[in-house]
Amino acid sequence: MKTESFRGRDFITLLEWSKEEVETILDVALDLKRRFALGEPHDHLLRGKTLFMIFYNQSLRTRNSFEAGMTQLGGHAHFLDPGKIYTPALPGREVAYSTERVSDVARVLSRMGHGIAIRCYGDPVDWVYGGANELIRNFAYWADIPVLNMECDKYHPFQALADILTVKEKFGTFKGTRFVMSWAYSPSVHKPRAVPQSAIIAATMMGCDTVLAHPPEMELDPEVLEVCRKHAAMNGSSFTVTHDFEEAARGAHVLYPKAWAPVQMFKPPVGVDDPKLAQEVFDRYKSWKATREYMALADKNAIYMHCLPADRGWEVEDEVIDNTDPPTGWRSVVYDQAENRLHVQKAVMALVMR
Ligand code: CP
């Protein structure tokens, strides 16, 4: 277990953390989860410390798990609505007395607290792929305190930590576990790539046999795919990409079907900035839905995963997502996944903000 060099670090993508460091985070998360279950206080870990949370987008799980997590660690989290502060903006995107340059916001908050967490993707950066990640990295450049990525347009690293902690709990091992990240249909194209990209980064990093399934138009960032291939080679595991929804599910231990935006949605050069075309593309694939028949293709002990919120009736049938406690066979673990957001975030905050 690695124990040094956590304090003061930013948490923006798992790509900046080693496998050994991620294993330490999971270990700390399990320890904090055990203490939470026992009602054992651990509020000395971040007593008197403050996390500033800036949400450009909606949230249920992320906001409440960070806020509750800070309380349980003895600190406090401030919820900051960008429309109610002066919206943090990069040079060139400033509006007089409505925005405030990120470099000023980051340096002011660094004088008052111990961490800055940011969620930003999609509309706030006009679907310029990487624009939100750039904003968060600019915060990290100027801040003297850790900057945490609560989901940008590229990565959702805390979701990925919760995902792999859930896999570890359910199967006890990553080796030989067939982890299928699949696209699924939703009527809304306004969904970033952050969850699937971080999920496959984490699954390949930990050594799962990882499969990415999606229609041709829903391809992910080629740089992320390249990293996944390298992870698989290092671990002696596999990483494959397919356009066949059902074939991918056969024999799977983990099925994680969810929607993400097609390339047409993004501004050039990544896409063509055409939301109408993006919607037409989406609507061609309504059959990509997690049904009982789909789950039956998987291993008999398979788990259904989703980061939530799920688009019930489109991405997944109620009979699948609600099948959380069956006597035997495959099951949904979505609420375990959601709970694990709390424990992994507490682990990272305790390690980097202490
Ligand atoms: N999974 C996730 O990040 O949920 P929220 O959008 O509710 O935060």
Image (cartoon, rainbow, N blue to C red):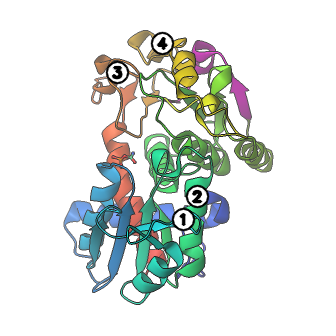
Mark 4 neighbour class, 10 Å CA radius: few under 14, some 14 to 19, many 20 or more: few
Q: Position of residue 184 (x, y in %)?
A: 49, 23
Q: Is residue 203 above or below residue 78?
A: above
Between the C-alphas of marks 4 and 3, the distance is 17 Å
Which residue is at the front of the view, 265 or 14? 265
Name the amino acid type tagged 2: Asn
- Which residue in the protein does label 3 denote? 320
Q: Residue 136 carries which label?
A: 1
Name the amino acid type tagged 3: Val
Name the amino acid type tagged 4: Lys
Q: Which of marks 3 and 2 is nearer the N terminus?
A: 2
Q: Do the residues labelled 3 and 2 touch (CB within 8 Å)?
A: no
Which residue is at the front of the view, 233 or 92? 92
Q: Does the magenta stretch include residue 189?
A: no
Q: Are marks 1 and 2 in contact (CB under 8 Å)?
A: yes
Ligand 1 lies under 8 Å from the Cβ of mark 4:
no
Between the C-alphas of marks 3 and 2, the distance is 34 Å
Name the amino acid type tagged 1: Ile
Q: Which mark is residue 286?
A: 4
Q: Earlier in the sequence, mark 4 or mark 3?
A: 4
Ligand 1 lies under 8 Å from the Cβ of mark 2:
no
Is label 4 or label 2 in front? 2
Q: Give the magenta range.
A: 239-257
- Which residue in the protein does label 2 denote? 133
Q: Element at badge 4?
A: loop
Residue 273 shown left or right of residue 98 in the figure: right
